[in-house]
Image (cartoon, helix red, strand yellow):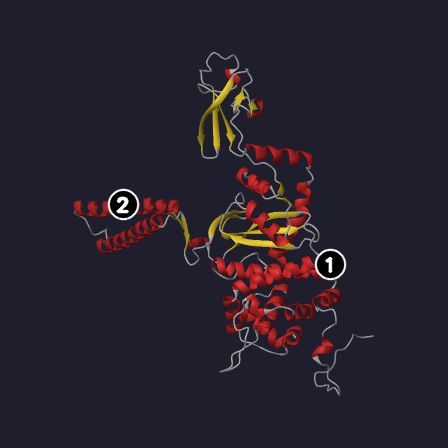
Amino acid sequence: MGYIKGEGRQQSSLFPPTLEELVPEDHLVRVIEAYVARLDLQALGFSKAEPLKTGRPGYDPADLLKLYLYGYFQRIRSSRRLEAECQRNVEVMWLLGRLAPDFKTIADFRKDNSAAFQATCRTFVQFCRQVGLISGQLVAIDGSKFQAVASQRKHLSLTKLKRQQAKLEAQISRYLAELDEADRSEATEGVDRSAVKAALQHLKSRHADNLTAQALMEVQGLDQFVMGEDEARMMRTHQGARVAYNVQSAVDGEHGLILHHAVTQDGCDNQQLEPMAKAAQAILEQEELTVTADAGYSNGEQFQACDDAGITAYVPENRGINNKGDDTPLFDRSAFTYDAKNDQYQCPASQWLTLKQVSGLQRIYARQGDCEGCPLKSRCTKAKRRYVTRHVHEAAFERMHQRMQAHPEMMVRRRSIVEHPFGNLKQWILGNGRFLLRQLRGARTEMALAVNAYNLKRAINVLGARRLIELLG
């Protein structure tokens, strides 16, 4: 039977196919074309949105935006690779009308329009909300670390610099000792004094640079610094410590669309619940909102702020546990009863612990007298008297505890809503989960494009390409 044969390379055609015939009616590029056509690029802040009246004409920002949306949708982020796609990819040829901008033009467009890309991302979220893809009934919040461009070798910290300083000083001392020994010894043939002095001079120069770096960091109030990308931070990840940014996302529970995202320098999530929840509330234009997040967002002050803003949060408590002792377990704080009216605690021995002092966000309670004579002292404390702390926002913690007890399923719902988008962003769109552009501005540009591509994909999956094109038209 043989094999299926392709068409001969020299075969001519009476009616060669047009680009329009090569692209199906429900293809991705038609969705991108319809989406960009409805955008007001000048209002969104794109540079050169109005063509110049003099000089050589430039590329339409709409064409370059379409190219980037297609590129991030297809895991093509490099400007050089996008240039190559313009010359070989039939889909891109249809999208751009066979335009083939060079890589420098493509790269400059992304570099110069960071704020406009972020505004475009927000515009698509509003469109999804208008067509009913976003319900706003439940929003899940989460954070994930995305690696920066800079290498770990470029990271400096005061602790690391002090360790290097101690090593350099030890090496300098060793070389000085060798020179002293050579001076005292008659047989100096075995010591190359010029080589030792050169090495010593090099060590002293490195030591001076180290001290200068420490002084500059202390003057600026920095505890860490990344050379070449000073806005990135060393953060803990599942793969160990990495130079990274912490990306926050608020995801709607209806179809998993990302309502809001933010690229931050904070390595922890416990300061992000309030700003992310309030941003989602503003986007949804709702007076009340229900959000859920993991234990990394546990923060009494933020719980209280959310309650005050009409935001009902579901977050597991993540609080320190008192030392129970080696052998005999000590009374936990739950064994002490709080009297809200008189602002005091009653201990298991029925004695009252009154407020002693306020330290930061903690209120410290202790007995006025000595605990020595108490028969339960061995089960209560090993110190002279027992101290009990109460958070300034303890009432908010208690309300959160009661909500989580009543709705333990919220953690399962959180995982099903918010972890899927991050998996897509890291593996499907950004490939290796690492940014290509430097500094916060570059990271925010790339994340805006990635989130826009992700939301576009979700909308196509839910509505279908044909229906989405109709709604965009």
- Quick one: SS at disc 1? helix
Q: Please tell me how crowded label 1 is: few (under 14), some (14-19), or many (20+) other residues with Cα within 10 Å.
A: few
| Quarter in which the N terminus is drawn | bottom right
Residue 254 higher or lower than 26, as above or below: above
Q: In the rendered structure, which amino acid carries the disc numbered 1? A: Val
Instruction: Tell whether 295 sits left or right of 387.
Output: right
Residue 468 higher or lower than 269, as above or below: below
Q: Earlier in the sequence, mark 1 or mark 2?
A: 2
Q: For this rendering, which residue is in front, 360 or 69?
A: 360
Q: For this rendering, which residue is in front, 275 or 98?
A: 275
- Nearer to us of marks 1 and 2 is 1
Mark identifier at residue 462? 1
The x and y percentages for residue 265 are: 49, 51
Q: In the rendered structure, which amino acid carries the disc numbered 2? A: Arg
The x and y percentages for residue 198 are: 25, 56
Residue matched to label 2 = 174
